[in-house]
Amino acid sequence: MATPAQSVPASNDDPLVIAGERYQSRLLVGTGKYKDNEETRQAIEASGAEIITVAIRRTNIGQNPDEPNLLDVIPVDRYTLLPNTAGCYTVEDAVRTCRLARELLDGHKLVKLEVLGDEKTLFPDVTATLEAAEILVKDGFDVMVYTNDDPLIAKRLEDLGCAAVMPLAAPIGSGLGIRNPYNILTIVENAGVPILVDAGVGTASDAPIAMELGCDGILMNTAIAAARNPVLMASAMKKATEAGREAYLAGRMPKKRFASASSPLDGLFF
Amino acid sequence: MNVTVNGESRSLDAEASLAELLQALGLQDKRIAVEVNRDIVPRSEYGSFRLTENDTIEIVNAIGGG
């Protein structure tokens, strides 16, 4: 977690560091729910994201093995892939998915862990998440972990050795925005690893709220993919995330109840 | 012999290798990972890995997701 700098920080000298790797973009994006692979490619490019999530699923062994795969369409060497455990409701399934992802991606260690507890809310099963995180960390993975906005659990996940902790701001895919800024703030204040809001952002004005709280980054998918124009929204999210980061580093003015004139009172001629 | 591939039953020649199964499925050059009976088989071992009756094979790839 960075503290606001006294001097003007160059935006190109403010990297997000996860598991020892430096990233210039603080916006991480998912690749789900797009119309097709081409729209996915354009949206992730417009977002400026360097880390993109992917899901691990059964290969289609039907009649069409030559159907283009996502990884054949996007320029994989330009991105850090973040395989997720979306859809996993047990420790075993989550760990198994990460190990398959590591094999699929030639020893890749960075994963997004999520162990879900409930289909309606997609809230995390935190006890299973803690258990899976411990196994994966011991197995050598760099774990970015989706969790709820509970500061105690966030700290426990950090203490287990997770590379980043990613509290939800609202349910996955809900677009409800930052529902509990004070919990996110407490998580950020306690943290020794990057804190990224994962899930809940609905539109561009939500992103700077998370960033101004001091979050190190944001991971989003539906807010971009479900926009009427996903590529344009991806561009908006890029700017919004950058604006929020700069505002955080700049340090906002104090709030006051009453007015404070911006023009001097000296020299009035009436 | 019969094996189960991604939940579907398949009939293979006795002692077929994993590489031969992937070839038959048109997946030999694809970005995939493979489990046989829940154990990951490294890519380098596809040719030497012999399948046996009732093996359960999972072949996965990366797709869009959040």
Image: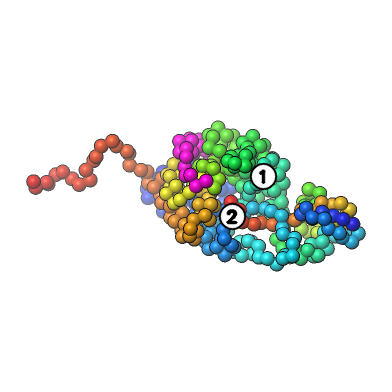
For this orientation, the residue located farthest to the right is: B14
Query: Residue A69: percent from the left, percent from the top?
Result: 66, 62
Please state which amino acid type lies under the numbered disc 2: Gly
For this orientation, the residue located farthest to the top is: A152
Residue labelled with disc 2: A32
Counting residues from the start of the chain, the first of labels 1 and 2 encountered is 2
For residue A194: magenta?
Answer: yes
- Residue A163 visible in the picture: no
Label 1, label 2: how many angstroms apart (C-alpha)? 16 Å
Tag 1 secondary structure: loop
Q: Are the residues flagged by discs 1 and 2 from a single subunit?
A: yes
Q: Residues within 10 Å of mark 1 (few under 14, many from 20)?
A: some
Position of residue A34 relative to residue A127, above or below, is below
Position of residue A36 relative to residue A151, above or below, is below
In the image, what residue occupies the spot 72% across and 65% down? A65
Residue labelled with disc 1: A88
- Among the 4 quarters of the image, the one containing residue A127: top right
For residue A231: magenta?
Answer: no
Please state which amino acid type lies under the numbered disc 1: Cys
In this rendered view, identify the residue nearer to me: A132 or A228: A228
Query: Residue A151: percent from the left, percent from the top?
Result: 53, 34
- Which region shows up in magenta? A174-195
In this rendered view, identify the residue nearer to me: A249 or B46: B46
The answer to whether residue A253 is left or right of residue B20 is left
The answer to whether residue A256 is left or right of residue A229 is left
> How many numbered circles are shown?
2
Query: Quarter of the image containing the N terminus of chain B?
Result: bottom right
In the image, what residue occupies the spot 57% across and 60% down? A35
Position of residue A251 relative to residue A75, above or below, is above
In the image, what residue occupies the spot 20% across and 47% down? A263
Chain where mark 2 sits: A
Q: Which mark is residue B53?
A: none
